[in-house]
Image (spheres, helix red, strand yellow):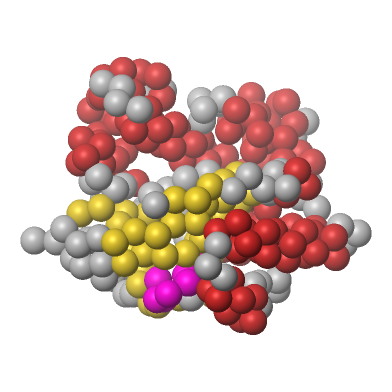
Amino acid sequence: MEAVHVPHPALRPYVASWVGFRAALDPRAVHHGLPSPTLTVVLALDEPLDVGWLDRGERERYWTCVAGLHTGPALVRTHGWQHGIQLALTPLGARALLGAPAAALAATMTEHAELPVGLPQCLLENLAAQRDWRRRHLLLERHLLSVLARRHDDPAHDVRPEVARAWWLIASSGGRARVADVAEQVGWGRRRLLEQFRAEVGVGPKEAGRIVRFDRSRRLLDAGIPLAEVADRAGYADQAHLSREYARLAGRSPSRLRESAYHLPG
């Protein structure tokens, strides 16, 4: 079951989605955490999150975790039960709500205790003690609004407008925008755009486009669109190109992901 929350208007530039989740699963089930244009914040309420990167092997357990932008899948061992709150933060939201640029969190998983602005342990305990999703969401929302208010006048809160616009151009184009065109529209040369964008977001503009394109294709896939049409509408050369990207970014084929975001080992 899922409990979707629409965040306060002041948080919407920073929080792309917000959902409470509770699911009973096969204890062997492994969830694929896929690349997306947002940073993933998970607050575990019953049991810590057992998660690691597919290509690195190591695993850690987290009660509070943020994963930055990445170009490979994370694997979450569910142990038969998932219960918590998940937020998807825009790259702008990293500075505003976590106190660090998205680049500092790219391709990593970080516990909130290690962040400049993280979720206090007492708040996590208070969230877990609630038995109503609405109360949990409003309690967390009040905390995030207070963080935003405290950081509003802090220059470190701001992302350079050129980088913010470059991100918007890439995201709104579905990942199809050419880097040279983006640089021209924000008034920078290609090299400066690459340096400034990577320093803030953690990936270059070309990699960002790749992630946005993959995310769009995944949504089309979830909507039941045929694979050849998914490839065309998401901007891939052909279905074979789509499949190669899924092997690299998701660690699974498009058809397998369409069946389920989980897999059973063996």
Locate residue 241 relative to residue 156 in the image: left or right: left
Relative height, residue 211 to residue 150 (above, below): above
Q: Does residue 261 appear in this view? A: yes
Q: Residue at x 73, y 26 (%)?
A: 185
**Residue 181 appears in which quarter of the rendering?**
top right
- Left/right placement of residue 110 relative to residue 230 reads right
Work out which quarter of the rendered image holds the C terminus and state it: bottom left
Residue 252 placement (x, y as % from top left): 23, 46
The quarter holding residue 218 reads top left
Residue for point 35% across, 18% down: 232
Residue situated furthest right in the rendering? 153
Q: Residue at x 70, y 73 (%)?
A: 116
Residue 75 makes an appearance in the image: no
Residue 46 position in % (x across, y down): 42, 74
The residue located at (32%, 74%) in the rendering is 58
Q: Which residues are magenta?
A: 43-49
**Where residue 12 sits: x, y (%)?**
70, 44
**Residue 92 at x, y percent in the picture:** 69, 49
Answer above or below: position of 191 versus 32.
Answer: above
Left or right, 82 with respect to 84, comes to left
Nearer to us in this view, 9 or 135: 135
Q: Is residue 259 magenta?
A: no
